[in-house]
Amino acid sequence: MSANRWLATGNFFATYKEEQRIFLTHLDRAVFVLFIAVLFTWPIFFELSNKYMLVINNILIAMVAIIGLNLVTGFAGLISIGHAAFVGVGAYTLASICQVIGYDHVAVTHAWPAMILLCGIVGAAFGAFAGLPALRLKHLYLAIATLSFQMIFEWVIHHTSFFNQGQTIFVGRVYWFTGQVGRSEHYFFWYYVCLVTLVLLGLSVRNLLRSRYGRCLVAVRDNDRAADAMGMSPGFTKVYAFGLAGFLAGIAGGLHAYMYRGVGIESFTLHQSIQYLAMAIVGGLGTLNGSFWGPAAIKLLDLQVENLAELAGKVLTSHLSLATALRPLTFGLVIVLFLMFEPRGIANWWRIVKSYFKLWPFRY
Amino acid sequence: MTYFLQLVVSGVVVGSIYALSALGFVLIYKSSRVLNIAHGQIIAAGAFITYALTVFLGIPIFISFLCSMVITFFLAMSVERVFLRRLIGEPIISVIMVTIGLMSILDGLIYLSPFGSNNYSFPAFLPETPLNFAGVSISWTQLVGVLITAVLISAFSWFFNRSTVGISMRAVSDDQFASMSIGISVPRVFGLAWAMAGLSAAAAGGIIGNITGLNFETLHAYGIIVFPVVILGGLDSVGGAVVAGIIMGLIQQFAAGYLDGNWGLSGTANVLPYIILLIILLFKPHGLFGTHEIERV
């Protein structure tokens, strides 16, 4: 431990416990607390239009989902091409409750935190079920298993009248202590809900990753035979990773359903799954802060692509919708270019910037 | 009984197309262990190139069919060259994710072309009246499609069993180091595997386009239905892909013929392959003919 608790240029760990700390210096902790405080206070001072508030909420929800995807793909090393389906399981849990007891039943509008938690639990159950082939198979086959889960999910939603054949199922407005959350403060309210959920889940996943179970995930990813020899059960670790990913995805689905006040299949298709994968790759697989960079980068890129398509649509006046073409094109390019030139994602840039400031004025 | 036979006939027609689509997929997997998730897009590209050559340039359909096979051959080869060549030696997960990105890119490019949003159908070049055998009918396009598929599949199996290039491809899939040591260029074989896959995908696309009409969503779906087929047949078995393709076609037709409409079910043909896929993964992951080399976790 260096003498200065605020700045540390090198590593002075004397115990493993010191190395496992989340914040290495007081400065790190202070910056983090300040950052969270800014996140909580800025909407009070700046009024943003609903359109941008929606984008920001979307980013936060995607971050929750991507933490899950990063656990399964980044930390446990299993490709999941069905993550949108797990988010969908969460959202459709809420939708089916709304179908049974009505969309403005007290349970839906007042007990919404419990509902979101329930979405997460159902998501975890489905995640663990879809991960069951992991008991016998390795990554390649698992990718196909998740893909088929995605296809089965879409089919079930499209072909059951209970789920309204994939058309929108309404979810009622929620109540807070001050009464019903109205139209004007809807996105404002859900910004805070998403933010609180994200901070809580982010911190708990950070803690999980430095526990025995988190190290288990990484050990199984790096070499499952060695992990087996050291007394871990690779199969169950993988199922467990899928369950955790399902839980986070389910929570994201519940938030999504409440924020849009409706559930429709178009948010949970294969394209969406690929967009989630793009987010995880761009952010940086196997790093927790990558799960925050990725969704922000991709969603903002998405916004720019939409603007560009609108602009180009005015100039070209062509009959085809440019947005549907440009969107997959940019996502595909982003995935491929990042994998080829920066496989460690934006999280790596963040690491470089951080070490630059840490070492300044020296080069290394 | 006639109904049953009719289902068998259409099952074999659909199944042989599946077999042809799965063939290219298996080729890439067999030589380089890469799951090509963008296969459906290559099929679609082949179909659209055939259509563009036939209708926009007015080339006779059989020649444009061959031309599109050649074009897609080089297209797939350059895809391998540009995107996958530099990833040799990287973890297989990132290679698979590159093909996911590739799928997205090709999606975008096809949406940019007029084929992304509209439906097209090939001009009829065969007799319109279907053939009839004791109540079982088969259209001329379907019959010709099945014949072309059969010819192509036997050409492919001759290529793998007899020709030097085919044997070197099999050698690479068996042991990369050993084949390098006897002078086979492994990267060239990878490129060739992608090119052959593109060729068979273009053929499949052309046949599908003639039988069902050109719609991007439908063609795209063939790239995903390939997964249940190859898992059933065994990921690295060319013969397995053919058998499993026909089995899958039959299953789909029987599901559509006997399950739909009963017990409130509909569209079962679209989901049954994936359910079968999950069951096979749980109980017999190497499929019917795959090598039993899967590591148990």
Image: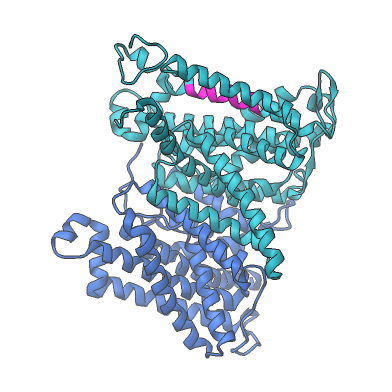
Q: In the depicted view, which residue is nearer to us: B275 or B225?
A: B225
Residue A154 pos. (x, y %): 64, 49
Q: Report the residue at 55% width, 44% height from top.
A: A82
The quarter of the rendered structure image containing the C terminus of chain A is top left
- Count of numbered tags: 0
Residue A75 belongs to the span the image colors magenta: no
Q: In the depicted view, which residue is nearer to us: A250 or B20?
A: A250
In the rendered image, the residue lying farthest to the left is B182
Q: Colour of chain A?
A: cyan
Query: Coloured how?
Result: by chain
Write down the quadrant of residue B154 in the picture.
bottom left
The quarter of the rendered structure image containing the N terminus of chain A is top left
Position of residue A18 in the picture relative to residue A161 (left or right)? left
Q: Report the residue at 41% width, 66% height from top.
A: B24
Position of residue B77 in the picture relative to residue B227 (left or right)? left
What is the magenta range? A195-206
Position of residue A307 in the picture relative to residue B154 (left or right)? right
The correct choice, above or below, for A231 with respect to B104 in the image is above
